[in-house]
């Protein structure tokens, strides 16, 4: 009798750990976003020869700054939607003597997104 009661107790205890699945109802999963979102429209406004302050005004403070490569700014962005689909972008800006020299990374023209 004690074994049956103990087995029933363990069964109830383990059943309480699981979340029952109800068809058509799923738990809320928030969208997760990390980094600096740099749209193609913003990148189109950034031109070689701009100062660091002008670039910072347009794009914001870079997510990564390397003390060994002070002339490189990295803007990294990723987003995970509710359905689990991930979107990621990476843009690196290189400066020469305080002026923007080149842009490398996931750069798309504003017309491509339309």
Image: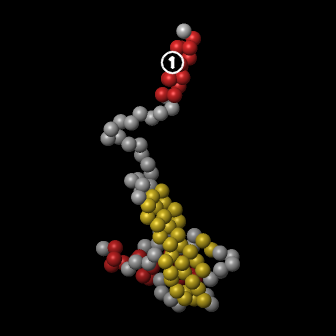
Q: Position of residue 89 (x, y in %)?
A: 47, 70
The residue at 68%/76% (across/down) is: 67
Q: Position of residue 113 (x, y in %)?
A: 34, 73
The residue at 49%/77% (across/down) is: 105
The residue at 46%/75% (across/down) is: 106
Q: Is residue 66 above or below residue 83?
A: below
Q: Please, which residue is most extreme toward the right here? A: 68
Q: Is residue 106 above or below residue 13?
A: below
Q: Position of residue 27 (x, y in %)?
A: 41, 43
Q: Is residue 50 visible?
A: no
Is the image coloured rainbow, by chain, by secondary structure, or in one colour? secondary structure
Label 1 sits on a secondary structure element that is helix
**In which quadrant of the rendered image does the C terminus lie?**
bottom left
The one nearer the camera, 47 or 2, is 2
The one nearer the camera, 78 or 5, is 5
Q: Position of residue 104 (x, y in %)?
A: 50, 81
Q: Specify few, some or many for label 1: CA neighbours under 10 Å numbering under 14, 14-19, or 20 or more.
A: few
The residue at 41%/58% (across/down) is: 85
Q: Is residue 112 visible?
A: yes
**In which quadrant of the rendered image does the N terminus lie?**
top right
Q: Is residue 58 above or below residue 99?
A: above
Label 1 sits on residue: 8
Q: Is residue 112 above or below residue 50?
A: above
């Amino acid at each position: 009798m004690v074994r049956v009661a103990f087995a029933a107790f363990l069964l109830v205890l383990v059943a309480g750990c699981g979340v029952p699945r109800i068809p058509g109802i799923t738990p809320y999963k928030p969208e997760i976003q990390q980094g600096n979102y740099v749209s193609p429209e913003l990148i189109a406004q950034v031109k070689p020869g701009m100062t660091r302050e002008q670039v910072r005004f347009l794009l914001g403070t870079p997510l990564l700054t390397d003390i060994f490569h002070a002339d490189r700014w990295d803007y990294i962005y990723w987003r995970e939607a509710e359905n689990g689909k991930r979107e990621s972008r990476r843009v690196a800006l290189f400066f020469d003597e305080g002026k923007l020299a080149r842009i490398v990374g996931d750069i798309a023209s504003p017309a491509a997104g339309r």
